[in-house]
Image: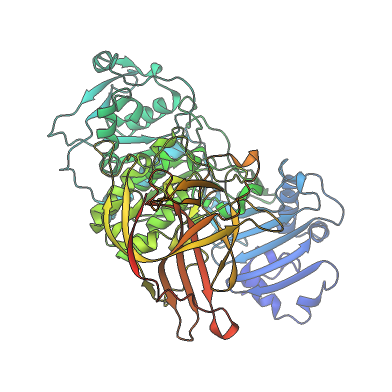
């Protein structure tokens, strides 16, 4: 039943009233052509109007419009008389609106064009309201500051639900513990000591994930390990570690794992051994604390004071009823990575760092102290203080029981996310994702080949450079200053990549990919003890398939774009986007004749684009094809150049995906007359 008194502007913020009002004669046209429009959509009802309508309705006595007007004045402090708009959305589970000011700079000093504001009743004021005129307003908890008891209670409640109810989150404590842990002293003692765990150690411990930053902080080295094992004051460790120790103690636990202190940083063997255990360390931790809001170890995440802008409103004649408007949480698992560099939201610092990706994926359960709120995730659920759904763009996981196809898709998504992040030391490209690689191997049995999976190698070779970057100004691809991966691996270039299952060019699920090449042999030369870690030059794949030689690569004749070239294949002029800018190099072939090929260039793009010399030849290797029932489809090629280090082997230059539609004259490229041969990729 509709309220006896309802507002024909805001519908009392009630979805039921809006639906009934829609049936009222002329309701939807009452304000037509005057800056007001109401309409039904799939999951609710929306009202779009100029903010001036809210002011006029407020003057007529609508309490809800009085509230909305106060909110608008708070979020758009410098309004124009008729230029600012709002879109009010009424749903079964939420009420929110978008503000679209005529001057976007007026939303708390930022340049976003729209601000999303959620409307709810505070949990502090719901007593006795169940039958009130405000009972339809959703009830949500307020977002507390990180150091508060409310925040700690949120963490404890998440832990209780997970440990008591989530079967998939149950942990096997029989596996070996981390080699070292910090033993935290009694609460208030302020002391700790480095502790070497015995093989039969089975006590729960907390792990910390954080950004090191550039500050010089206490870390374990060969020279001070004995001193740290004797004990030290927690005042000596950076603020983020102090915060993690404080939470550990409040949870009634005694042990904390922190990489800087539990790994001997200047001992290569210890570093490699412990880095190879990351999968187990985070998986077996009772809880992982992610210091998401701290950009350096010496920055406290518990003393982080930023929270979404909030406005509270007490109904004048009902002071026990509190309506709240809160700007949406936009960080952590709500972050929209598709918005690109124009996105006014700065991501959590941990979201832009390479090492912290696996530290968020591997834990059985984790609490993230994000910029806007606390966010929880375990193997069963994702939740947060604001109670909004996570953005799937930022979510990827390798979970027990997944199909192999789903595991491959999740791996590809992780690679896409990972290559958008930065590393202080570029040679850490494989070690920083080693734990995830180990987890995939453990669950599938697949063989790891320098960032690719042998069991799905043809798919895995179809990665592409992706110029879009969600965090920083778009930068052209660069080469690592030191060798870290063979050219066939996505880790060989410094740029975001898309993999086959995440690419816009990937076929539909019902399109079968037919493999036209196969792996004959692989040789991955490890530089340490971690089979998923750093590798040495000389790593190679031997492939068998059809190779078209002597294809000339041309510079564009008109507009030049980074690493973009033209090639003539099967009578078709095609655009080829290389993995990185190319350059011509000359050498003497095995037949004793001079030859020209293309190779990857280490020259930075900001020093200008490189002109290929006439007669620069490449080879085209047919990898696979996908064919539809109507004869259309796609052929997938690797473009290869002679390897500068071994002219009889090849270096990957990039991938070409060629669409085929014979009815429109785009014929399949015929490789049938080319003999099958073996080639080596370096």
**Relative image position of residue 661 (x, y in whole percent):** 54, 80
User: Residue at image x 63%, y 47%?
Assistant: 341
Vertical position of residue 192 compared to residue 332: above or below: above
Name the one closer to the observer, 221 or 147.
Answer: 221
Q: Position of residue 597 (x, y in %)?
A: 50, 52
Q: Residue at x 57, y 49 (%)?
A: 469
Q: Nearer the viewer, residue 260 or 235?
A: 260
Residue sticking out furthest to the right = 81
Q: Is residue 167 visible?
A: no
Question: Which quadrant of the figure has residue 573?
Answer: bottom right
| Image position, residue 556 (x, y; %) | 66, 58
Residue 321, position in %: x, y? 61, 51
Question: Residue at the location (28% across, 42% down)?
Answer: 525
Task: State which quarter of the image contains the N terminus.
Answer: bottom right
Would you say residue 164 is visible in this rendering? yes
Q: How many marks?
A: 0
Residue found at the very far front of the displayed protein = 592
């Amino acid at each position: 039943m509709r309220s006896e008194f309802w507002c024909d502007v805001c519908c009392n913020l009630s979805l039921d009233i809006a639906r009934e009002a829609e049936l009222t004669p002329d309701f939807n046209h009452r304000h037509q052509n005057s800056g007001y429009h109401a309409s039904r959509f799939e999951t609710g009802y929306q009202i779009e109007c100029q903010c001036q309508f809210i002011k006029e309705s407020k003057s007529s006595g609508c309490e809800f419009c009085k509230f909305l007007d106060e909110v608008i004045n708070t979020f758009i402090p410098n309004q124009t008389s008729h230029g600012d708009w709002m879109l009010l959305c009424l749903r079964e589970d939420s009420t929110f609106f978008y503000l679209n000011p005529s001057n976007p700079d007026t939303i708390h000093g930022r340049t976003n064009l729209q601000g999303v504001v959620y409307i709810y009743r505070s949990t502090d004021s719901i007593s006795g309201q169940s039958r009130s005129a405000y009972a339809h307003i959703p009830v949500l908890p307020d977002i507390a500051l990180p150091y508060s008891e409310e925040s700690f209670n949120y963490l404890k409640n998440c832990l209780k639900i997970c440990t008591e109810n989530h079967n998939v989150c149950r942990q096997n404590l029989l596996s070996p513990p981390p080699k070292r842990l910090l033993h935290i002293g009694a609460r208030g003692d302020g002391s700790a000591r480095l502790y070497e765990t015995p093989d039969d150690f089975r006590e729960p411990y907390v792990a910390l994930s954080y950004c090191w930053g550039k500050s010089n902080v206490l870390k374990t080295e060969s020279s001070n390990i004995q001193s740290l094992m004797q004990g030290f004051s927690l005042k000596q460790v950076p603020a983020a570690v102090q915060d993690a120790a404080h939470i550990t103690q409040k949870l009634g636990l005694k042990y904390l794992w922190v990489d800087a202190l539990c790994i001997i940083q200047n001992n290569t063997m210890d570093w490699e051994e412990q880095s190879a255990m990351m999968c187990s360390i985070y998986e077996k931790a009772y809880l992982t604390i992610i210091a998401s809001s701290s950009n350096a170890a010496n920055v406290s995440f518990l003393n982080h004071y930023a929270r979404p802008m909030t406005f509270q409103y007490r109904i004048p004649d009902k002071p026990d009823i509190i309506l709240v408007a809160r700007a949406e949480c936009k960080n952590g698992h709500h972050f929209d990575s598709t918005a690109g560099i124009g996105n006014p939201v700065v991501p959590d610092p941990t979201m832009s760092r390479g090492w912290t990706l696996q530290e968020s994926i591997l834990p059985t359960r984790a609490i993230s102290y994000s910029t806007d709120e606390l966010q929880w995730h375990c193997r069963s659920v994702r939740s947060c203080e604001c109670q909004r759904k996570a953005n799937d763009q930022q979510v990827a996981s390798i979970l027990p029981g997944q199909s192999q196809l789903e595991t491959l898709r999740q791996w590809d998504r992780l690679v896409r996310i990972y290559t958008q992040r930065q590393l202080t030391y570029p040679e850490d490209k494989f070690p920083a994702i080693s734990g995830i690689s180990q987890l995939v191997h453990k669950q599938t049995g697949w063989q790891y080949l320098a960032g690719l999976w042998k069991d799905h190698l043809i798919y895995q070779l179809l990665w592409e450079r992706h110029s879009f970057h969600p965090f920083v100004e778009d930068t052209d691809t660069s080469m690592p200053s030191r060798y870290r991966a063979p050219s066939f691996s996505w880790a060989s270039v410094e740029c975001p990549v898309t993999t086959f299952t995440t690419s816009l060019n990937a076929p539909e699920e019902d399109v079968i990919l037919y493999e036209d090449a196969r792996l004959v042999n692989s040789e991955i030369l490890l530089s340490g003890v971690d089979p998923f870690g750093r590798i040495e030059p000389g790593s190679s794949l031997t492939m068998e398939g059809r190779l078209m030689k002597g294809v000339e690569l041309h510079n564009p004749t008109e507009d030049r774009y980074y690493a973009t070239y033209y090639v003539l294949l099967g009578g078709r002029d095609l655009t080829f986007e290389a993995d990185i800018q190319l350059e011509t190099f000359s050498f003497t072939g095995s037949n004793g004749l001079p030859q020209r090929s293309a190779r990857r260039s280490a020259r930075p793009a900001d020093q200008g684009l490189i002109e290929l010399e006439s007669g620069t030849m490449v080879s085209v290797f047919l990898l696979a094809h996908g064919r539809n029932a109507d004869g259309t489809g796609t052929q997938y090629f690797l473009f290869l150049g002679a390897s500068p280090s071994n002219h009889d082997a090849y270096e990957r230059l990039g991938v070409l995906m060629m669409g085929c539609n014979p009815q429109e004259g785009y014929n399949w490229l015929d490789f049938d007359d080319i003999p099958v041969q073996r080639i080596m990729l370096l």
